Image (tube, helix red, strand yellow):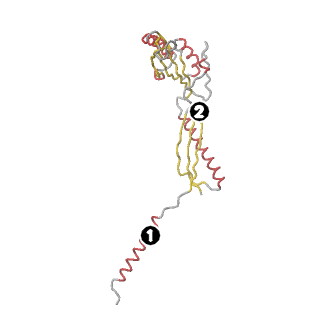
């Protein structure tokens, strides 16, 4: 005898099998794209319009008070000279102020005797008129500054050079990608991802013997060119 529910059960089983097949097809992972990753570097240079220097005063006296008092007098004269020459308050910042004892180690190295004190006051200064920097440094030294830490060149606004450096980095990455794809026998597809890398400017202040050798006509300053650097990473699909 044929069971009355068999046709219905068969239909339900068929629907279940069809649904499972559709689900398995929908969940199947898509094949992964092959990619090429390249990093490009770019630079952009121009004549700097900003000079940063570290200038200061170092004094010595028999007491800490006298050393600091003398230092204050000479540093104030230096600051006044800078202001008189057109340096704005915002372009001057104290970077170090210290008072330390001086010891005589020759008599007793394990327990040296204090023979006086030294005071140091360093000032970081931004000069926006590079052509006048040499004469200004010479004048500051004449007014009491006797310690020059170094100079560096940069830009009041480095955004235009940074943009150009990034563009050059992208072009460099594209050229690398094209060369690698040709060598590997593959075809470049669309760019899947762009990653911005580092951006660096001119180096920090450094000791410069040309500036340390100050002359009556002013310290010789050679600005040359300063460079902004950037890197960019591109990820291509390859076929």
Q: Nearer the viewer, residue 175 or 141?
A: 141
Q: Position of residue 115 (x, y in %)?
A: 47, 11
Q: Position of residue 103 (x, y in %)?
A: 48, 14
Q: Is residue 39 left or right of residue 25?
A: right
Marks 1 and 2: CB-CB under 8 Å?
Answer: no
Q: Quadrant of the N terminus?
A: bottom left
Q: Quadrant of residue 215?
A: top right
Which residue is the extreme one toward the left?
Answer: 4
Q: Nearer the viewer, residue 230 or 64?
A: 64
Spatial CA span between label 1 and label 2: 60 Å
Read off the residue under disc 2. Answer: 227
Q: Nearer the viewer, residue 107 or 59?
A: 107
Secondary element type, mark 1 = helix
Q: Position of residue 11 (x, y in %)?
A: 38, 79
Which label is found at residue 22?
Answer: 1
How many neighbours does mark 2 have within 10 angstroms: few (below 14), some (14-19), or many (20 or more)?
A: many
Disc tally is 2
Residue under the point 46% across and 67% down: 25
């Amino acid at each position: 005898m044929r069971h009355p529910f068999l046709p219905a059960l068969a239909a339900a089983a068929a629907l279940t099998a069809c649904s499972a097949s559709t689900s398995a097809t929908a969940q199947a992972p898509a094949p992964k794209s092959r990619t090429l990753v390249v990093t490009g570097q770019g630079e952009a240079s121009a004549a700097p319009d900003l000079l940063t220097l570290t200038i200061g005063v170092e004094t010595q006296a028999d007491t800490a008070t006298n050393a600091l008092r003398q230092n204050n007098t000479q540093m104030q004269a230096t600051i006044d000279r800078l202001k008189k020459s057109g340096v704005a308050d915002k372009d001057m910042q104290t970077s170090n102020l210290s008072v330390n004892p001086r010891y005589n180690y020759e008599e007793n190295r394990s327990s040296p005797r204090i023979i006086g004190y030294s005071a140091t006051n360093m000032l970081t200064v931004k000069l926006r008129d590079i052509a006048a920097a040499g004469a200004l440094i010479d004048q500051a030294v004449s007014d009491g500054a006797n310690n020059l830490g170094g100079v560096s060149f940069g830009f009041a606004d480095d955004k235009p050079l940074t943009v150009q450096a990034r563009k050059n980095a992208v072009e460099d990455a594209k050229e690398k990608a094209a060369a690698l794809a040709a060598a590997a026998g593959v075809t470049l597809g669309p760019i899947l991802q762009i990653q911005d890398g580092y951006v660096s400017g001119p180096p920090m202040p450094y000791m410069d013997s040309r500036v340390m050798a100050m002359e009556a006509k002013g310290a010789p300053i050679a600005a040359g060119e300063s460079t902004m650097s950037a890197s960019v990473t591109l990820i291509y699909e390859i076929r």
